[in-house]
Amino acid sequence: MALGTLARHGPQHGHQIRRLADVTGVGEWGGVSVGALYRELRAMEREGLVELVRTEQVGRRPARTVYAISREGRLELAALREQAIRPVEFGPDPLAVALTFAAYDIDREELREALRARRDRLAVAGRETSAKLERLTAKGYINPIEAATIRRGEIHIEAEARWLDELDALLAKDIPLTEDMPPAESTERAERAEGTAGPETS
Protein backbone atom coordinates (compact mmCIF):
# COMPACT_ATOMS: atom_id res chain seq x y z
CA MET A 1 0.00 0.00 0.00
CA ALA A 2 2.73 2.49 0.98
CA LEU A 3 5.00 1.71 -1.96
CA GLY A 4 2.10 1.88 -4.41
CA THR A 5 1.00 5.23 -2.99
CA LEU A 6 4.51 6.68 -3.36
CA ALA A 7 4.84 5.29 -6.89
CA ARG A 8 1.51 6.79 -7.93
CA HIS A 9 1.47 10.15 -6.11
CA GLY A 10 5.17 10.93 -5.76
CA PRO A 11 6.93 11.89 -2.52
CA GLN A 12 4.64 11.81 0.52
CA HIS A 13 4.97 11.98 4.26
CA GLY A 14 3.46 9.32 6.50
CA HIS A 15 0.41 11.39 7.40
CA GLN A 16 -0.55 11.77 3.73
CA ILE A 17 -0.22 8.03 3.15
CA ARG A 18 -2.24 7.27 6.26
CA ARG A 19 -4.96 9.72 5.26
CA LEU A 20 -5.32 7.96 1.90
CA ALA A 21 -5.47 4.61 3.71
CA ASP A 22 -8.23 5.94 5.96
CA VAL A 23 -10.24 7.33 3.02
CA THR A 24 -10.10 4.05 1.11
CA GLY A 25 -10.64 1.91 4.24
CA VAL A 26 -7.80 -0.41 3.21
CA GLY A 27 -7.19 -1.34 6.84
CA GLU A 28 -10.61 -3.01 6.90
CA TRP A 29 -10.81 -4.79 3.55
CA GLY A 30 -7.10 -5.14 2.73
CA GLY A 31 -5.73 -6.37 6.03
CA VAL A 32 -3.24 -3.48 6.03
CA SER A 33 -2.03 -2.54 9.51
CA VAL A 34 -2.23 1.22 9.15
CA GLY A 35 -1.06 1.69 12.74
CA ALA A 36 2.31 0.22 11.79
CA LEU A 37 2.81 2.58 8.84
CA TYR A 38 5.51 4.82 10.33
CA ARG A 39 7.51 1.86 11.60
CA GLU A 40 7.24 0.21 8.17
CA LEU A 41 8.38 3.37 6.40
CA ARG A 42 11.50 3.50 8.58
CA ALA A 43 12.12 -0.21 7.93
CA MET A 44 11.73 0.31 4.18
CA GLU A 45 14.19 3.21 4.35
CA ARG A 46 16.75 0.91 6.01
CA GLU A 47 16.15 -1.66 3.29
CA GLY A 48 16.59 0.90 0.54
CA LEU A 49 13.02 0.64 -0.74
CA VAL A 50 12.22 4.28 0.01
CA GLU A 51 14.42 7.33 0.23
CA LEU A 52 14.20 10.25 2.63
CA VAL A 53 13.59 13.36 0.51
CA ARG A 54 13.24 16.05 3.15
CA THR A 55 11.79 16.92 6.53
CA GLU A 56 9.15 19.63 6.56
CA GLN A 57 7.31 21.47 9.28
CA VAL A 58 4.17 23.57 8.99
CA GLY A 59 3.50 25.95 11.87
CA ARG A 60 3.54 24.21 15.21
CA ARG A 61 2.79 20.80 13.78
CA PRO A 62 5.37 18.06 14.33
CA ALA A 63 8.09 17.76 11.69
CA ARG A 64 7.16 15.29 8.96
CA THR A 65 9.53 13.15 6.96
CA VAL A 66 8.82 13.01 3.24
CA TYR A 67 9.68 9.76 1.46
CA ALA A 68 10.00 8.79 -2.19
CA ILE A 69 10.04 5.31 -3.66
CA SER A 70 13.47 4.15 -4.82
CA ARG A 71 14.42 2.03 -7.82
CA GLU A 72 14.68 -0.98 -5.50
CA GLY A 73 11.28 -0.06 -4.10
CA ARG A 74 9.73 -0.17 -7.58
CA LEU A 75 11.20 -3.63 -8.13
CA GLU A 76 9.81 -4.74 -4.77
CA LEU A 77 6.41 -3.24 -5.62
CA ALA A 78 6.33 -5.22 -8.88
CA ALA A 79 7.22 -8.42 -7.00
CA LEU A 80 4.56 -7.80 -4.33
CA ARG A 81 1.95 -7.10 -6.99
CA GLU A 82 2.80 -10.36 -8.74
CA GLN A 83 2.60 -12.27 -5.43
CA ALA A 84 -0.85 -10.81 -4.79
CA ILE A 85 -2.31 -11.45 -8.26
CA ARG A 86 -0.96 -14.92 -9.03
CA PRO A 87 -2.40 -17.10 -6.21
CA VAL A 88 -6.01 -18.25 -6.48
CA GLU A 89 -6.25 -20.10 -3.17
CA PHE A 90 -8.36 -18.75 -0.34
CA GLY A 91 -6.93 -18.28 3.12
CA PRO A 92 -7.68 -20.18 6.34
CA ASP A 93 -11.39 -20.69 6.99
CA PRO A 94 -12.20 -21.19 10.69
CA LEU A 95 -15.93 -21.43 9.93
CA ALA A 96 -15.37 -24.41 7.63
CA VAL A 97 -13.20 -26.06 10.29
CA ALA A 98 -15.88 -25.50 12.95
CA LEU A 99 -18.67 -26.89 10.76
CA THR A 100 -16.62 -29.89 9.63
CA PHE A 101 -15.24 -30.95 13.00
CA ALA A 102 -17.35 -29.34 15.73
CA ALA A 103 -20.94 -29.15 14.50
CA TYR A 104 -21.96 -32.72 15.29
CA ASP A 105 -22.71 -32.22 18.97
CA ILE A 106 -24.60 -28.93 18.83
CA ASP A 107 -28.37 -28.64 18.76
CA ARG A 108 -29.47 -28.00 15.18
CA GLU A 109 -31.63 -25.01 16.06
CA GLU A 110 -28.84 -23.54 18.16
CA LEU A 111 -26.50 -23.86 15.19
CA ARG A 112 -29.08 -22.24 12.89
CA GLU A 113 -29.48 -19.37 15.33
CA ALA A 114 -25.72 -18.79 15.49
CA LEU A 115 -25.42 -18.87 11.71
CA ARG A 116 -28.39 -16.51 11.31
CA ALA A 117 -26.67 -14.06 13.67
CA ARG A 118 -23.61 -14.27 11.41
CA ARG A 119 -25.91 -13.62 8.43
CA ASP A 120 -27.31 -10.53 10.17
CA ARG A 121 -23.82 -9.18 10.81
CA LEU A 122 -22.95 -9.75 7.16
CA ALA A 123 -26.03 -7.81 6.10
CA VAL A 124 -24.88 -4.85 8.19
CA ALA A 125 -21.36 -5.09 6.71
CA GLY A 126 -22.85 -5.25 3.22
CA ARG A 127 -24.93 -2.12 3.74
CA GLU A 128 -21.94 -0.27 5.17
CA THR A 129 -19.74 -1.31 2.24
CA SER A 130 -22.38 -0.24 -0.28
CA ALA A 131 -22.83 3.12 1.45
CA LYS A 132 -19.06 3.67 1.53
CA LEU A 133 -18.73 2.85 -2.17
CA GLU A 134 -21.55 5.23 -3.06
CA ARG A 135 -20.16 8.02 -0.84
CA LEU A 136 -16.56 7.77 -2.07
CA THR A 137 -17.66 7.57 -5.71
CA ALA A 138 -20.02 10.56 -5.39
CA LYS A 139 -17.26 12.70 -3.84
CA GLY A 140 -14.73 11.67 -6.47
CA TYR A 141 -12.34 10.25 -3.87
CA ILE A 142 -11.74 6.97 -5.70
CA ASN A 143 -11.03 5.98 -9.29
CA PRO A 144 -12.76 3.13 -11.19
CA ILE A 145 -10.14 0.54 -10.14
CA GLU A 146 -10.53 1.46 -6.46
CA ALA A 147 -14.31 1.38 -6.83
CA ALA A 148 -14.10 -2.06 -8.43
CA THR A 149 -11.96 -3.26 -5.52
CA ILE A 150 -14.58 -2.16 -2.99
CA ARG A 151 -17.26 -3.74 -5.18
CA ARG A 152 -15.31 -7.01 -4.97
CA GLY A 153 -15.68 -6.90 -1.20
CA GLU A 154 -19.39 -6.26 -1.67
CA ILE A 155 -19.69 -9.34 -3.92
CA HIS A 156 -17.83 -11.49 -1.35
CA ILE A 157 -20.34 -10.46 1.31
CA GLU A 158 -23.27 -11.17 -1.01
CA ALA A 159 -21.89 -14.62 -1.88
CA GLU A 160 -21.32 -15.52 1.79
CA ALA A 161 -24.87 -14.40 2.62
CA ARG A 162 -26.31 -16.59 -0.16
CA TRP A 163 -24.30 -19.56 1.07
CA LEU A 164 -25.55 -19.05 4.62
CA ASP A 165 -29.12 -18.96 3.30
CA GLU A 166 -28.52 -22.28 1.50
CA LEU A 167 -26.98 -23.79 4.63
CA ASP A 168 -29.94 -22.64 6.72
CA ALA A 169 -32.32 -24.29 4.25
CA LEU A 170 -30.30 -27.52 4.53
CA LEU A 171 -30.38 -27.40 8.34
CA ALA A 172 -34.15 -26.87 8.20
CA LYS A 173 -34.64 -30.28 6.57
CA ASP A 174 -35.33 -33.27 8.80
CA ILE A 175 -32.45 -35.36 7.50
CA PRO A 176 -29.22 -36.58 9.13
CA LEU A 177 -26.40 -34.21 8.25
CA THR A 178 -23.38 -36.08 9.60
CA GLU A 179 -22.28 -39.64 9.04
CA ASP A 180 -21.41 -41.56 12.18
CA MET A 181 -18.37 -43.59 11.17
CA PRO A 182 -15.06 -44.33 12.88
CA PRO A 183 -12.30 -41.84 11.99
CA ALA A 184 -10.07 -44.54 10.47
CA GLU A 185 -12.85 -45.73 8.17
CA SER A 186 -13.68 -42.17 7.21
CA THR A 187 -10.04 -41.46 6.34
CA GLU A 188 -9.74 -44.66 4.31
CA ARG A 189 -12.87 -43.82 2.36
CA ALA A 190 -11.59 -40.30 1.63
CA GLU A 191 -8.26 -41.68 0.43
CA ARG A 192 -10.01 -44.11 -1.91
CA ALA A 193 -12.08 -41.26 -3.30
CA GLU A 194 -8.91 -39.23 -3.92
CA GLY A 195 -7.10 -42.26 -5.37
CA THR A 196 -4.31 -42.08 -2.78
CA ALA A 197 -5.01 -45.23 -0.78
CA GLY A 198 -3.27 -48.50 -1.37
CA PRO A 199 -5.09 -51.67 -2.52
CA GLU A 200 -8.04 -52.69 -0.40
CA THR A 201 -7.57 -55.65 1.93
CA SER A 202 -10.27 -58.04 2.95
Image (cartoon, helix red, strand yellow):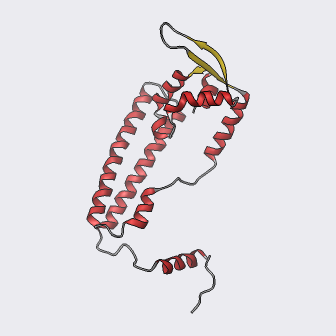
Please say if 110 is above or below 187.
above
Left or right of 51: which side holds 182? left
| Res 175 visible | yes
In this orientation, does residue 49 appear? no
- Considering only vertical position in the picture, is 114 above or below 136? below
Vertical relation: 73 (above or below) 10: below
Residue at the spot x=36%, y=42% of the render?
125
Q: Return the residue found at the far right.
A: 71
Give the left or right position of residue 124, taking residue 12 as reference: left
Judging depth in this view, the residue of 80 and 33 nearest the camera is 33
Residue lying farthest to the top in this orientation: 59
Residue 32: image x %, image y %?
52, 37
> What x and y, as percent, mark residue 131?
37, 35
Q: Is residue 198 above or below residue 81?
A: below
x and y, in percent, of residue 89 in the image: 57, 54
Residue appearing at x 59%, y 18% in the figure: 65
Q: Position of residue 53 (x, y in %)?
A: 66, 17
Q: Quadrant of the C terminus?
A: bottom right
Q: Relative to residue 54, is residue 157 drawn left or right?
A: left
Quadrant showing the N terminus: top right
Instruction: Depth check: give the residue in front, 87 or 34.
Output: 34
